[in-house]
Image (cartoon, rainbow, N blue to C red):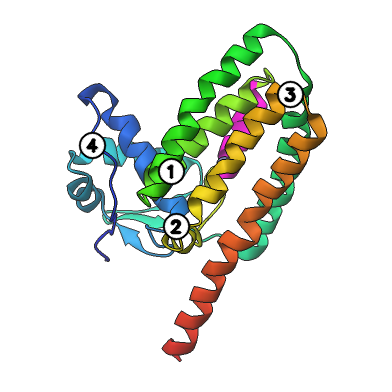
Amino acid sequence: MREPALPILPPRPPRESIRQYVADTIRAALIAGELVPGQVYSAPALAKQLDVSATPVREAMLDLARDGMVDVVPNTGFRVTEVTPRELDHITEIRLLLEVPIMGEVAAATGPERDAKLNELRPIVDSMVDAAERKDLTNYLSADATFHTRFLALHGNDILVATVRQLRDRTRLHGLKAVADAGNLVENTNEHYAMLDAALAHDRPAMEQIMRDHIGHVRTNWAAEAVMAQCRGDSTAR
Ligand SMILES: [Zn+2]
């Protein structure tokens, strides 16, 4: 069994939200590839890394198992599920079908209440810029999920929001670390400000284009870096 590597941890939250903190941190670490597919991790070892007791980690891992992100290995721990490039393509295809038109709808909608809710999302993007500058992938991905979930929720379809959230959790952005290391994560973050601006301007075509580009990163620059790293790893292994 491999010792977990969670190099950058967000600041510890108040006690009542420990379970949520653990769940969000582990989800983000899975998406960023900091928890490695195929590897088995034990709840006590992860708990030690996160400086919490094993109970919230076990609870979070069981939630992740239910969502298909890890498999339970009896008496040992949890194996991180592998997502193939083909599966990533399929996930991306569905996200494009759902998120592009719905975000277009959100942009086309009107009303002062909607605008107030949009403006509440701006500080979340500020925190993403902050995390991007610190190359803090865990906090970055956690804020990214919150931003997109709340933005989509403005459409008023809870089932759609839950479906997209699940698809996002199954996405693997193993190239994100390379993007962050190259200092390009802040640039990607600016797309989120552009989404807010497009919605406030009721510019549906602009929003749909931003969303196509944004979701497309999963299978272009972010993933490409990962594939290259994998190829390099494979050739040295042989
Ligand atoms: Zn995003």
Q: Mark 1 or mark 2, which is nearer the start of the sequence?
A: 1
Sort mark 2 into few (<14), some (14-19) or many (20+) by Cα contacts within 10 Å. Answer: many
Q: Is residue 181 above or below residue 123?
A: below
The residue at 43%/52% (across/down) is 30
Indicate the secondary structure of the residue bearing disc 2.
Answer: helix
Front position in the image: 195 or 17 = 195
The residue at 38%/58% (across/down) is 34
Sort mark 1 into few (<14), some (14-19) or many (20+) by Cα contacts within 10 Å. Answer: many
Kind of residue at disc 1: Tyr
Q: Position of residue 147 (x, y in %)?
A: 53, 31
According to the image, label 1 marks what residue?
Answer: 140
Query: CA separation, marks 3 and 2?
Result: 30 Å
According to the image, label 3 marks what residue?
Answer: 201
Asked whether disc 2 touches disc 1, contact meaning CB atoms under 8 Å apart, the reply is yes
Q: Mark 1 or mark 4, which is nearer the start of the sequence?
A: 4
Query: Which label number is shown at residue 180?
Result: 2
Query: Which label number is shown at residue 55?
Result: 4
Query: CA separation, marks 2 and 1?
Result: 10 Å
Q: Which residues are magenta?
A: 158-168
